[in-house]
Image (tube, rainbow, N blue to C red):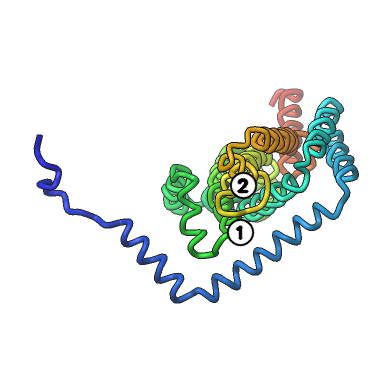
Amino acid sequence: MEDQESTVIPSIQVGDWVESGVDWLTGNFREIFRTFSDVLETLINGLIDALLFVPPDLMIVVLVLLGLILRSWQFAVGSALGLSAVVAMGMWEAAMQTLGIVVFATVVAVLIAVPIGVLAARNRVVSNIVQPVLDFMQTMPAFVYLVPAVILFGIGFVPGLLSTIVFALPPGVRLTELGIRQVDAETVEAGQAFGATPRQILRGIQLPLATPTIMAGVNQVIMLALSMAVIAGMAGADGLGKLIVESIARLDVGLGAEAGLSVVVLAIYLDRLTASIGGSGSDKSLGALIRRSRGRSVAQRVTTGI
């Protein structure tokens, strides 16, 4: 077998290049990263403090009522039992910290993902550029995101939060683009025939009709954010992830089981709740009006024999 060192393929020191780039960033923009970290830390701590300010019993009532309104009474009963179990296990504070990270990361990821997805759906060049980037973001191991984030922003919520946003972003972009591309072309053409501008078509036809697919993307963003928020505990982010990391380090099976069950309760609640959004309700969009108008036109043609 030929010695590996005799290969004609030149050596590429990618790791050294990345390390040099990170060192250059930390050396030249340390104050900017520190300021950015302080701002994010203040925002996420404010959100977590707001969640913890509400007494657990009242928060459970609010979450259960939300589940009752958006889903069903069976889901509301299950949510009440699951959330009460989180309180009974003494995991409520850590659960609210994890929920704060997930909510913050999801909002930021969706605000970034939806415009990019819309732009990619309307411009093939943008789509061709975005797709490889999303492939890279999705296939990169989740733990890798923590390394540069910790170097740039230190230990705490911020590296875990940024890693969570990057990791959870791709499904939102992909499903937003897919949802808009799947909108019936005839409905869009009918909107154009009514004299609607591209912005009106996007706002009144494409986005409302693509809402179920977009919400499926939001659901996936939330699930990935929750999984990454647990991994972010390795970077020092408070919450259930940190407790799971501690349970591994101390071989504390009980702590790991309680934190893990709390993650399961949060995951099921968020998954079922977001899955029920976007698939119901009255359809008052411009797309619905156009479909009804086209339906009446077809009916008139049928009845008149034209």
**129 left or right of 77?**
left
Which residue corresponds to the image point at 65% horizontal and 44% vertical from the top-left? 243
- Residue 181 point in image, percent of width and height: 56, 41
Task: Tell me, yes or no, whether the two marked residues, 1 and 2, touch with CB atoms within 8 Å.
Answer: no
Q: Is residue 60 visible?
A: yes
- The answer to whether 216 is drawn above or below residue 149 in the figure is above
Which residue sits at x=75%, y=57%?
47
Label placed on residue 71: none
Residue in front for this viewpoint, 170 or 261: 261
Q: Cα distance, mark 1 to mark 2?
A: 12 Å
x then y, percent, for residue 295: 73, 31
In which quadrant of the rendered image does the N terminus lie? top left
Q: Residue at x 84, y 33 (%)?
A: 80
Residue 190, above or below 146: above
Residue 237 lies, in percent from the top left, at 62, 53
Residue assigned mark 1: 156
- In this orientation, does residue 271 appear? no
Discs 1/2, front = 1
Q: Secondary structure at mark 2?
A: helix
Q: Residues within 10 Å of mark 2 (few under 14, many from 20)?
A: many
Q: At 55% from the left edge and 49% from the top edge, which residue is drawn? A: 234
Identify the residue position indicated by label 2 in the image: 229
Height in image: 154 above or below 210? below
Which element type, helix, strand or loop, lies under badge 1?
Answer: loop
Q: Report the quarter where the C terminus lies.
A: top right
Answer with mark 1 or mark 2, whichever residue precedes in sequence: 1
Q: The residue under label 1 is which amino acid type?
A: Gly
Q: Position of residue 56 (x, y in %)?
A: 86, 45
Q: Residues within 10 Å of mark 1 (few under 14, many from 20)?
A: some
Q: Nearer the viewer, residue 14 or 174?
A: 14
Question: Closer to the camera, 39 or 115?
Answer: 39
Give amino acid for label 2. Answer: Ala
